[in-house]
Amino acid sequence: MITGLRRDLGSRAASGSWLVGLCALIAYALLASPRIVDGDSAEFATLAAIGGRAHPSGYPLYVLWLRLWSWLPGATAAQAAGFATAILGALAVGVLHAACRAWGARPVAATISAVIVAAAPIIERYHSEAEVFAMNNLVVALVLWISAAGGPLRGRWRAAALAVIAGAGLANHLTCVLVAPIGLLGVVRGVRETRAAGGSAVAACALAVAGLGLGLLPYAYLLAGDGPASWGDVATLSDVLDTFLRRDYGGATSFQATGATVPWLTSVAALAATIARSWLWLLAVGGVAMLAVRIRRPIGESRWAWALLAASFVLAGPVLVARFNIDPQGLGRYVCERFHVLPTILLAVPVAALLDLVCARLARPAIATGAAVLGFAVLSLASAPGLARVHSPAMELGIRNLLRSLPPSSVVVVIDDDLCFGGRYVQLVRGERPDVAVVCGGMLPWPWYRAVWARRGLLLADDLGPSLGVALLRTGRPSFVDRRQTRLLTAYPSYAFGITRRLLPPGTEPPRPRDVAAINREIYRGYDLDYPRPGPDDEYAAVAHHRYAEGWVTIASLLAAGGDREAAAEALELARALLPADD
């Protein structure tokens, strides 16, 4: 095994893999965001800095990786986590290049395929911020490489390595199971190779089972990963299993507890658009067509291997997204696009096979390889402005603005993930306003979450209705809720306070509209808005600015209802100035 692996690492193919991986590492490190940009990046950046359990399925391998690299010299914890993720992304690209070679592509074809997908906007994004998908891409690339007939391992070591990778993949992100057809092909090959060499197939299978258990070991971290940012109570193996199966979310196959009824064709069309943009349109069509061609006329791999690759692509792509109940528009597009990464990566192998038909005629492949690397730089520069907009400081500063505007020892109940997990990051890692209690309203139905606040002296209700208002007002602390909590706000008097509403005891008269406007002008004067205004499609950066504007729209309505049209017009003008650009 060792001799074969050294031979592969010393080959020209591996040299090309290292070159592509190094270029990707430089690009991803330069693009790494110094700010949190969504709820997941906020949670993982927090866990990278202080440890703890992530939301189900726990993602323990990725959390441990972030902890291992938390010493990296980023300007912030978010950027250090981005650097750690960039390493994974670069490894994924390098291994993907090797996988394309193992499936029969020439070095230059593998290089062109790898650099195109490495520079795709969606890949650059998830390889440069704290998210689990870079590690998932590495797992998938390893499965493609090691399962191939031309992969680096043979016999029982092939089967064992794939089993370890499978377990480790499940300890990172459950969608890696969608490439099981290819992984099982590799395991079967390993067992057959063992038997052909005179070894024991049973021993090879036993070694593979042991390898799977070894790969799953990171889940033991959930038993020890307590901390102020940890999710849930995990004290037994049953609790670990519940986390793995995502019981809090309704099960491993659940995406969103409530959602729209989305036609499957809409979700598949959104997937097709992502893949097409990532593969420069024509190559996307050619890559899908090449799967059919290679199944019919196999080259570089067996017909079964190409068929199983096609099956994995269909499972990870159309079959998976057809189950979504999330409309792929606005923030829904952001939620859905994360699951478009896996099929985009899988298409690298057939695209390399397509490019190989052209590269066979090249007289100087070294020049073509250099041009491909230069093309990677050009494509990365082209996608950098869009990525910079998504990596806007607007979301993080919005949370800091909220915290700084609140009175001492306030309680604020928020719904959205960016405010919930972002609040933890800004407080626990950045040290902003630890006196404020940021309560995640969507988590109140879970007993373990209410118990966390009970230990801190806050006894909270299990829903977002009037009973929560009773609990908040009983604390005697200034209480605020976001505007989406309509049941609570209908039951109690309140008034606009920045991006929230201040909750008042029953029978209390809210301030007059002009006084509310004056209070909010003072609040907004203290907000840090010194950055380029995001556009309407810039995800949570745009959401932050919609929150700013919505408060002034509400105030304008109150002023207009009271007959103060001039002040209402001024409030509406402020709202327009705060909206995302061109919205």
Image (cartoon, rainbow, N blue to C red):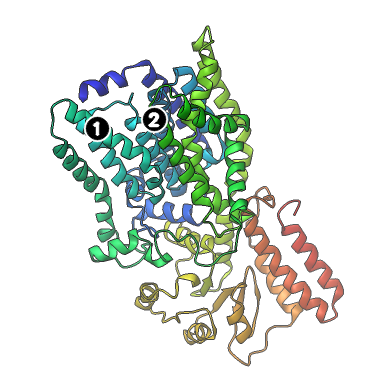
Callout count: 2
Foreground residue among 437 and 14: 14
Q: Can residue 314 be seen by looking at this rendering?
A: yes
Give residue 163's position: percent from left, percent from top. 26, 41
According to the picture, the residue beneath numbered tag 1 turns out to be 190
Q: Secondary structure at mark 1?
A: helix
Foreground residue among 308 and 321: 308
**Quarter location, residue 553:** bottom right
Q: Amino acid at mark 2?
A: Val
Q: Is residue 261 left or right of residue 301?
A: right
Does 374 appear above or below 437? above
Q: Residues within 10 Å of mark 1 (few under 14, many from 20)?
A: many
According to the picture, the residue beneath numbered tag 2 turns out to be 95
Give residue 280's position: percent from left, percent from top. 61, 31
Give residue 190's position: percent from left, percent from top. 24, 32
Q: Is residue 484 left or right of residue 183?
A: right
